[in-house]
């Protein structure tokens, strides 16, 4: 073969190699950029849920504080005064059930419940917790025995004008928080869920994982949960996403954000295949 054809062939090979190399580099850059954008979007969604939760939680906490300040100022701490006021608070703040216990055992509530002589609210966690806390005490979600639904609570100590101390508390339905979570669960493959500070499951797309009278599951009780708990506990790792096998057998990526008001955890589980399908299709087009 003559030298000129050899040079042409070698030149073509070099050019083709260069084109393929540039394409590979370009696709790699595009892949990483797209991946980062998708991850950022999922992180933002988790943070958005936490932010909306905090807005609502702050409103509930402020209502508690403002109303007890008003009751102290007006000195409304007899059964005839306190119960009607608390009942109005319940009506005004739907989903709340307010009550007050004084240090002399006096008990007031807004649901016309007459406490039996043996009932002493001073031993209740919301009372002891508030007495020991600075500011508003937070009770993590629990199943209300009376209402039969998931609730959580805020409570706060105060001092009446006659010198008696007391605690006001409210038991709050999780319905509004559940609506916030569900607004992000329209996808058939992705979903949001809620954990408390001990990583107990509060709200989950799979109804079998939600708390009932018979069971209360933690994160480690569900498929992939041990890996997720390890990730949440190891905050120093700086890991932004974790790939795990979910309860339905699908591979998902886990993202999280924390409530600034309660320190509860908002989780986002995003389908791995659904997330990266556009990238795979682009790769197929490139190879073809």
Image (cartoon, grey):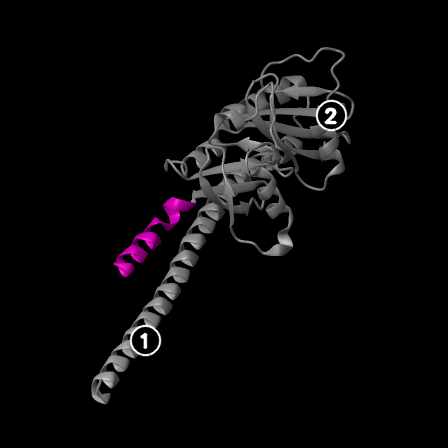
Work out which quarter of the rendered image holds the C terminus and state it. Answer: bottom left
Is residue 170 shown above or below 54? above
User: Is residue 161 visible from the viewing direction of this image?
Assistant: no
User: Is residue 184 visible from the viewing direction of this image?
Assistant: yes
Magenta span = 272-288
Tell me how far mark 2 sits from mark 1, CA to CA.
81 Å
Q: Secondary structure at mark 2?
A: strand
Q: Which residue is mark 1?
A: 18
Residue at x-position 39% and y-position 45%: 273
Q: Which residue is mark 2?
A: 102
Residue found farthest to the bottom: 3
Q: Main secondary structure of the magenta part?
A: helix
Is 239 in front, or is 117?
A: 239
Image mark count: 2
Quadrant for residue 201, please give it: top right
Q: Is residue 276 left or right of residue 159?
A: left
Work out which quarter of the rendered image holds the N terminus and state it. Answer: bottom left
Please state the horizontal and vertical placement of residue 49, each as a whole percent of the image. 47, 43
Q: Is residue 126 left or right of residue 192?
A: right
Q: Is residue 273 magenta?
A: yes
Looking at the image, tell me whether mark 2 or mark 1 is earlier in sequence order.
1
Residue at x-position 44% and y-position 53%: 39
């Amino acid at each position: 073969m003559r030298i000129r054809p050899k040079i042409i062939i070698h030149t073509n090979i070099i050019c083709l190699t260069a084109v393929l190399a540039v394409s590979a580099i370009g696709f790699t850059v595009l892949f990483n950029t797209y991946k980062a954008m998708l991850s950022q979007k999922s992180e933002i969604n988790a943070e958005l849920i936490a932010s909306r939760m905090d807005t609502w939680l702050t409103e509930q906490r402020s209502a508690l504080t403002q109303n007890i300040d008003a009751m102290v100022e007006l000195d409304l701490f007899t059964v005839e005064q306190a119960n009607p006021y608390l009942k109005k608070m319940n009506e005004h703040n739907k989903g709340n059930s307010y009550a007050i216990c004084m240090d002399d055992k006096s008990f007031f509530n807004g649901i016309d419940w007459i406490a039996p002589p043996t009932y002493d609210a001073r031993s209740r966690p919301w009372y002891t917790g508030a007495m020991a806390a600075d500011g508003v005490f937070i009770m993590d979600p629990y199943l209300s025995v009376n209402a039969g639904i998931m609730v959580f609570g805020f409570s706060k100590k105060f001092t009446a004008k006659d010198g008696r101390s007391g605690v006001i508390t409210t038991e709050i339905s999780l319905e509004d928080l559940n609506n916030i979570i569900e607004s992000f669960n329209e996808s058939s493959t992705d979903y949001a869920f809620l954990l408390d500070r001990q990583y107990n499951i509060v709200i989950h797309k799979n109804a079998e994982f939600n708390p009932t009278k018979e069971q209360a599951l933690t994160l480690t009780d569900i498929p992939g949960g041990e890996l997720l708990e390890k990730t949440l506990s190891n905050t120093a790792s700086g890991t932004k996403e974790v790939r795990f096998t979910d309860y339905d057998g699908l591979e998902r990526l886990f993202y999280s954000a924390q409530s600034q008001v309660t320190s509860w955890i908002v989780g986002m589980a995003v389908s791995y295949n659904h997330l990266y399908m556009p990238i795979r299709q682009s790769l197929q087009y490139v190879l073809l």
